[in-house]
Image (tube, grey):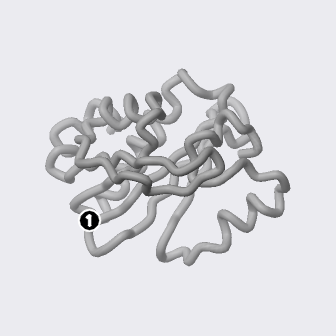
């Protein structure tokens, strides 16, 4: 998360110190946001993470980030699909993600997983790359259940 290219679409600049990264993941109330590392089966080094935050009863927001060297291999798709499956198994009725309109890899991932574009929030984020709009993509539990077998094994 110190890679400027990987962090381009995140709502904050890359972390300069490991202590800052640690604080980012541990300062939140654990009942609000949960995070999981993405690991490749053949190594024990994290290549990214997925996160889920409860917004209100039955509704969770997700986020994800993958190291540049790990992009394009399906790791994000697999990890996000597993996270969605978990959230719906826990009883969530809706999962959503917000992404920058210029973040085409994220838009492609969300669309491939069955998310629907629900709207655009103008000038939503003040970030390290300026004031940015945000696209909101949502997925309902019944929409996921009809396609979950494609993404999550038995």
Q: Above or below — where is 147 with respect to 126?
A: above
Q: Could you say whether the residue bearing mark 1 is in a helix, strand or loop? A: loop
Quarter of the image holding residue 90? Answer: bottom left
The one nearer the camera, 117 or 88, is 117
The crowding category of the residue bearing disc 1, from other C-alpha atoms within 10 Å (few below 14, some 14 to 19, many at least 20), is few
The image quadrant where one finds the C terminus is top left
**Residue at (74%, 38%) from the top-left corner?**
3
Across and down, in percent, residue 64 comes to 52, 46
Q: Position of residue 59 (x, y in %)?
A: 29, 65
Q: Position of residue 41 (x, y in %)?
A: 62, 33
Q: What residue sits right under mark 1 in the picture?
A: 91
In the rendered structure, the answer to whether residue 138 lies left or right of residue 133 reads left
Residue shown at 25%/42% (left/top)? 117
Task: Describe residue 151's horizontal placement relative to residue 21 as left or right.
Answer: left
Q: Is residue 33 rendered to the left or right of residue 70?
A: left
Q: Is residue 115 left or right of residue 106?
A: left
Q: Residue 48, how many percent across, how many down?
A: 62, 42
Residue plotted at (25% across, 58% down)? 94
**Eyeballing the image, is 92 above or below 118?**
below
For residue 30, above or below residue 95: below
């Amino acid at each position: 998360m110190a890679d400027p290219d990987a962090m381009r679409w995140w709502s904050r600049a890359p972390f300069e110190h490991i202590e800052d990264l640690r604080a980012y993941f541990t300062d939140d109330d654990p009942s609000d946001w949960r995070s999981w590392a993405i690991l490749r089966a053949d190594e024990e080094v994290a290549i990214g993470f997925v996160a889920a935050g409860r917004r209100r009863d039955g509704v969770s927001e997700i986020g994800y980030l993958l190291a540049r060297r790990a992009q394009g291999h399906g790791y994000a798709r697999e990890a996000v699909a597993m996270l969605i499956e978990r959230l719906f198994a826990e009883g969530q009725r809706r999962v959503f993600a917000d992404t920058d309109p210029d973040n085409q890899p994220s838009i492609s991932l969300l669309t491939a997983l069955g998310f629907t574009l629900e709207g655009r929030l103008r000038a939503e984020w003040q970030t390290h790359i300026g004031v940015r709009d945000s696209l909101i993509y949502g997925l309902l539990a019944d929409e996921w259940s009809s396609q979950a077998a494609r993404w999550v094994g038995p």
